[in-house]
Image (cartoon, grey):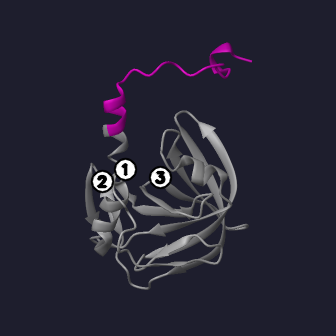
Amino acid sequence: MNPSLSRPALALPPSFSTREFRNALGMFATGVTIVTARNAAGELVGLTASSFNSVSLEPPLVLWSLSHGASTMPAFANGSHYAIHVLAADQKDLAERFATRGIDRWAGLEHRPGISGAPLLAGAAATFECFNRSQYKEGDHTIFVGEVERCEHREGASPLLYHGGKFYTEHPL
């Protein structure tokens, strides 16, 4: 085998700053989600996340990730179920609310229990109720893989998008 084609044992150290990396990642437009659950005491928890993706159709699997330092990590790491809400364009305020620290994110907020007890928010473009199938610690985040037990979507809803640190909605080309 040609030594120049062999797989290296380790990655090269980054040639960029954390800020440069974040700015480059910001060029990838994403949808915006809120992930909700109940902690061990039955209290509602939730957060805004843009790290959401499909994994598999059979079985139906989705993924999202959470910083190891997040205050909600114990609830998601130890819980059996959670719900992922893909936000609609008219839910920008909700996205900001669930991204804000130190507030009661649930005060006065309309929600109902899902089939597993995870709270479901009204008005989402799509909702995925998930069994907490597996978790993978990578870098400073944990990747959660959820097995979808139930999903629904709001026909015709425009998505809330995030790009370069700002919220947008769709504009078909």
Q: Which tag is nearer the camera, tag 3 or tag 1?
A: 3
Using the numbered discs, state the Cα–Cα distance from disc 3 to disc 1 in whole angstroms: 11 Å
The numbered disc on residue 28 is 1
Q: Residue at x 68, y 14 (%)?
A: 3
Which residue is drawn at the image coordinates 66% and 19% (left, top)?
Answer: 9
What SS does tag 2 mark? strand
The x, y position of residue 145, in whole percent, is 64, 55
- Residue bounds of the magenta highlight: 1-22
Which secondary structure type mostly characterizes the magenta part of the structure?
Answer: loop
Q: Is residue 69 above or below residue 130?
A: above
Query: Residue at image x 39%, y 61%?
Result: 32
Question: Image quadrant of residue 114?
Answer: bottom right
Mark 2 and 1 residues: CB-CB less than 8 Å, in contact?
A: yes
Which amino acid, by three-letter code, is at mark 1?
A: Phe
Judging depth in this view, the residue of 106 and 6 nearest the camera is 106
CA–CA distance between discs 3 and 2? 13 Å
Hey, which residue is sitting farthest top in the picture? 3
103 in relation to 113, above or below:
above
